[in-house]
Amino acid sequence: MVQETTFDNGVRLVSQQVPGMHTVSLGIWVSNGTRQEEPATSGVAHFIEHLLFKGTARRSARQISREIDSLGGVLNAFTGHEYVCYYAKALTRFLPQVADILADMFLCSAFPADEIEKERSVVLQEIKMRDDTPEESIHDRFHLSFWQGHPLGKPILGTTGTISGIRRDAIIEYQRHWYRPSEIVIAAAGALEHRQLVDLLAGKFAVLPSGGPQRPVAGCSRTNRGRVMELCERDLEQTLICLGTDGLSHADPGRYSLVLLNTILGGGMSSRLFQEIREQRGLAYSVYSYVSSYADAGALTVYAGTDRQQSCEAVRIALAEMARLRDETAPADELNAAREQIKGKILMSLESSDSYMSRLARSYLYFGRYQPLEEVMAGFDAVTPADLQQLAGRLFRDASLNIQVMGRVDKTCFAEGQGALSL
């Protein structure tokens, strides 16, 4: 029950009717994010995400929040490296009001000067909060180091310097340039009628002139700086570790193998990292791995938090498990268990209209079409143990390894053990 309508100016509206639901989720997605920013305005995409909640010609910031609360709904937004999303969720009978609120914010935000200054202070506090949260800061350090020199290497929040310096005219110009019909996908899912959505939104979005921004040439390879190890001394109770290697883009044919490879490595309680580092050795409470995929590149990252004296051992174990996946064929039963784990998580996630909406939008952003659930499941079913080993051999290379260590760092251990800490 997926339907698509393209408005005259190029805005795409896609919807998925889900029988049995009582809610509807509506999201306005803009297919640009941090990677489109200039260095001097780093963080402007995220700043705009905040500012669209701060008032229009028809509604003040307080009226926006009061109106959505009075519907019992949820209104929120998030910024990524390649897109920004503004979304709302409410009972189906309130869809007209929700559509009006979202469209008003997106199309008619006033960017009041006083609200910009107040929100500038809020974003600066958000930057400080992340810096003060080691478990988030270590992932930021890994990302910035791994993607250094690549458009994806820009921090989503920006920096204290750039946020302090961004002026109102630069904010308005960025929105005018990038919030164009060719970049916009409106996605909705739940108990809805597609024709009603078209009637609610086509007229509102007609105010946007057709056409799109001048994008840089698509595709940009990450600069391989060779094996990187960076140590950050901080007075923490734990030593935190992030290490990773190259991953795959969203559309890479090996993406199904990558998800399964990550699941086996560190994607749950039965994963090799969890079992070996936590259950067998008791070295860490939190240990896992995850995949970050983008339009033209990706990364696979491992995280662990442990004692200073045990940090080198934790890194060695993580690297040994990655090497084992590269050098040995994974047992068929382990692959099958990972396959069922992933398929189960996908199906369970689709018990809410917002999950349907997000999946629908990302499908159009990255593939330009709807990916049926059956196609995705078939992709996982087709992966063989040989596929996993071949992919691990392609990705798990010492030449692309990046290791970040934060906390009370045993510098002697890491300095002398660098030869051993390799893939």
Image: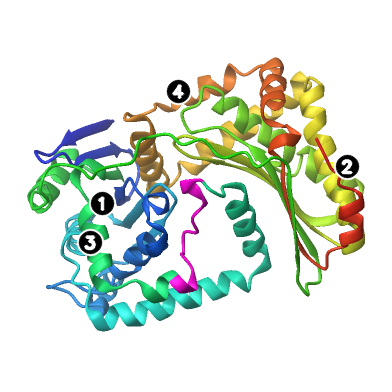
Secondary structure beneath label 1: helix
CB atoms of marks 1 and 2 within 8 Å: no
Q: Quadrant of the N terminus?
A: top left
Residue at mark 1: 178
How far apart in space, not on screen, are marks 3 and 1 (Cα)? 9 Å
How far apart in space, not on screen, are marks 4 and 1 (Cα)? 34 Å
Q: Nearer the viewer, mark 1 or mark 2?
A: 2
Q: Position of residue 161 (x, y in %)?
A: 46, 73
Image point 20% across, 48% down: which residue? 180
Nearest the camera: 106 or 380?
Answer: 106
Q: Nearer the viewer, mark 3 or mark 1?
A: 3
Image point 32% across, 64% down: which residue? 48
Residue at mark 4: 374
Q: Position of residue 134 (x, y in %)?
A: 68, 67
Secondary structure beneath label 2: loop
Query: Of the residues shown, which amino acid type is indicated by label 3?
Result: Glu
Query: Of the residues shown, which amino acid type is indicated by label 1?
Result: Trp
Range shown magenta: 150-161
- Residue 87 lies within the magenta run: no
Query: Of the residues shown, which amino acid type is indicated by label 2?
Result: Gly
Nearest the camera: 96 or 64?
Answer: 64
Residue at mark 3: 173
Counting the numbered discs, the total is 4
- Residue 154 lies within the magenta run: yes
